[in-house]
Image (spheres, rainbow, N blue to C red):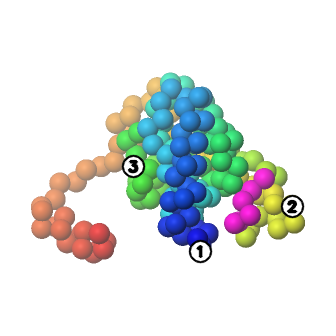
Amino acid sequence: AILPGGVEHKLFMGFPREAEIWKAVSAVVPAVRAVNLTAGGCGWLHAVVAIEKNVDGDAKNAILAAFSAHPSLKHVVVVDPDIDVYDPEQVEWAIATRFQADEDLVIIRGARGSTLDPSADQETGLTTKVGLDATIPIGLDRRAFSRARIPMSDRVRELLRRLRGA
């Protein structure tokens, strides 16, 4: 049996959807660099997409294309290529430092959702979808949006790795 939201679900159902999302987003933006249906989103409901954009509207177009390619998606975060879509900490950092809700948030109410989502309306299957543009605006100095790199000794780095359980 395949349990919804488990590793098997991602392997058998999620990976093909990542390819569909990649294809759809590639049709509307200059370059897609990565697509990940996240473990925290049950390998099905949340996606992170890394793109290179030419204009600021590219990220919003990528969000809409991702929702179109995979109707079960509930959340889509679009990031720049310098963010690792497989690292939740980097994605959250991009949201914290590159996202402004009044300009970069896409909300789609009353859309078809996933039958695996217990928060969706159980009679109609409708849900609200959210897209976040966590990319650096065109024309701004990218260095201002770079993560600080603090040098540390190998010993300190190893201690931090152990503390984080990596």
Badge 1 is on which residue?
1
Q: Report whether 139 appears left or right of 144.
A: right
Residue 39 in view of the camera: yes
Q: Which residue is mark 3?
A: 84
Judging depth in this view, the residue of 59 and 74 nearest the camera is 74
- Which residue is depicted at the point 55% across and 55% down? 14
x, y percentage for residue 36?
49, 51
Amino acid type shown at disc 3? Asp
Task: Decide which of tag 1 and tag 3 comes sooner along the chain.
Answer: 1
Q: Are marks 3 and 2 in contact (CB under 8 Å)?
A: no
Write down the residue under mark 2.
124
Q: In the rendered structure, which disc, 1 or 2, sits on the residue that comes first in sequence?
A: 1
Q: Are marks 1 and 3 in contact (CB under 8 Å)?
A: no
Residue type at mark 2 is Thr
Q: Is 55 placed left or right of 74 in the picture?
A: left
Q: Is residue 24 left or right of residue 52?
A: right
**Quarter-of-image position of residue 146:** top left
User: Which span of residues is magenta-colored?
Assistant: 112-117
